[in-house]
Image: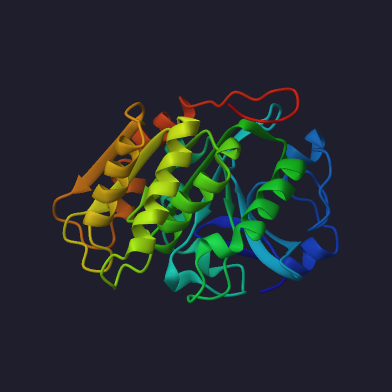
């Protein structure tokens, strides 16, 4: 896995090279955030494999820097949270499903964003248990690549969709908009509980207070995460008083895989919607 590779026709700088200080979009070693180096940024593109210290361990993750992205100014970024099938510690599985394959297939749409791809280690853990890891990846990439803090977006599928709802509610100041795909609260394979209802209300109250733009996606024939999960979350936002920039797209014929439709078929509209949402950032760095 070390060295230089190509995945889907895109250059990947291996972990061994990264750990030894090979340049990324800012020319620094993994886990060592530095100020962006524009001369390096002009050269380094592709899927950059990185490590970051978080949760008392070193974690492998990836950053995609599109081939034609201009890094002369702070760039918008998307944090992508994968599903159950991509869990692990190799730093690569999360590259194979969801947003990155869509981005590699359509640079005209997704080539405007740096994409940050953390990887959670265990299927049994929710993304909300790994907030520290997600935020560490975002912070390291912001420092390395010069990300625009007013244009950071959060999306994810299945377990990552659940994580999108939860992490955005915990840290609404970090994100300008979110796009959960087939997300949920609680355990989607069990009947909803009072704890689930309380968690849904808490998430909705936080996002409503922050006036968070939300565009959610779900398949009507999803037999893994029932579409009622999304209806209940959207309804909770309305109950919490947020009737502004909230969208819900239901795919009549889609099963659990609604992400290909969201990121590919609706990718142009979603990317445009993301870029039109910009959060206010104070001098102290707090949003909204």
- Residue visible at 51% across and 45% down in the picture: 168
Q: Where is the N terminus found, in terms of image quarters?
A: bottom right
Residue sitting nearer the eye, 91 or 41: 91
Residue 235 lies in what quarter of the image? top left
Q: Is residue 78 in view?
A: yes
Residue 123 is situated, as x and y percent measured from the top left of the image, at 48, 75
Question: Going by the image, does 203 lie left or right of 171?
Answer: left
- Residue visible at 35% across and 31% down in the picture: 241
Question: Going by the image, does 281 lie left or right of 261?
Answer: right
Query: How many numbered circles does the render carry?
Result: 0
Residue 82 is situated, as x and y percent measured from the top left of the image, at 47, 61
Q: Where is the C terminus found, in terms of image quarters?
A: top right
Residue 55 lies in what quarter of the image? bottom right
Colour mapping: rainbow
- Residue visible at 60% across and 63% down in the picture: 130
Residue 100 is situated, as x and y percent measured from the top left of the image, at 48, 53
- Residue visible at 65% across and 33% down in the picture: 149
Residue 145 lies in what quarter of the image? top right
In the displayed structure, 155 sits above or below 240; it is below
Residue sitting nearer the eye, 256 or 285: 285
- Residue extending farthest to the left is 252
Q: Is residue 3 in view?
A: no
Residue 128 is situated, as x and y percent measured from the top left of the image, at 54, 60
Question: Going by the image, does 42 lie left or right of 154?
Answer: right
In the displayed structure, 244 sits above or below 248; it is above
């Amino acid at each position: 896995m070390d060295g230089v590779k190509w995945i889907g026709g895109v250059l990947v700088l291996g972990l061994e090279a990264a750990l030894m200080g090979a340049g990324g979009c800012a020319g620094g070693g993994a886990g060592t955030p530095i100020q962006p180096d524009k001369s390096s940024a002009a050269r380094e593109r592709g899927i950059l494999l990185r490590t970051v210290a978080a949760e008392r361990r070193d974690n492998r993750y990836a950053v995609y820097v599109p081939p034609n992205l201009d890094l002369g100014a702070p760039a918008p970024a998307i944090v992508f949270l994968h599903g159950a099938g991509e869990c692990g510690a190799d730093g690569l599985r999360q590259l194979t499903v969801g947003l990155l394959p869509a981005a590699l297939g359509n640079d005209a749409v997704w080539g405007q964003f740096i994409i940050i791809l953390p990887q959670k280690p265990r299927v049994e853990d929710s993304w909300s248990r790994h907030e520290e890891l997600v935020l560490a990846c975002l912070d390291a990439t912001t420092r390395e690549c010069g990300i625009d803090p007013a244009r950071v977006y959060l999306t994810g599928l299945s377990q990552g969709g659940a994580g999108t709802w939860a992490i955005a509610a915990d840290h609404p100041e970090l994100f300008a908009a979110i796009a959960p795909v087939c997300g949920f609260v609680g355990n989607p394979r069990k009947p909803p509980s009072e704890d689930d209802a309380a968690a849904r209300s808490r998430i909705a109250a936080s996002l409503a207070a922050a006036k968070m733009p939300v565009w959610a996606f779900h398949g009507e024939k999803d037999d893994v995460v029932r579409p009622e999960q999304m209806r209940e979350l959207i309804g909770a936002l309305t109950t919490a008083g947020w009737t502004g920039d909230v969208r819900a797209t239901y795919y009549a014929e889609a099963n659990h895989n609604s992400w290909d439709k969201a990121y590919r078929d609706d990718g142009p509209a979603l990317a445009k919607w993301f870029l039109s949402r910009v959060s206010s950032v104070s001098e102290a760095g707090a949003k909204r």
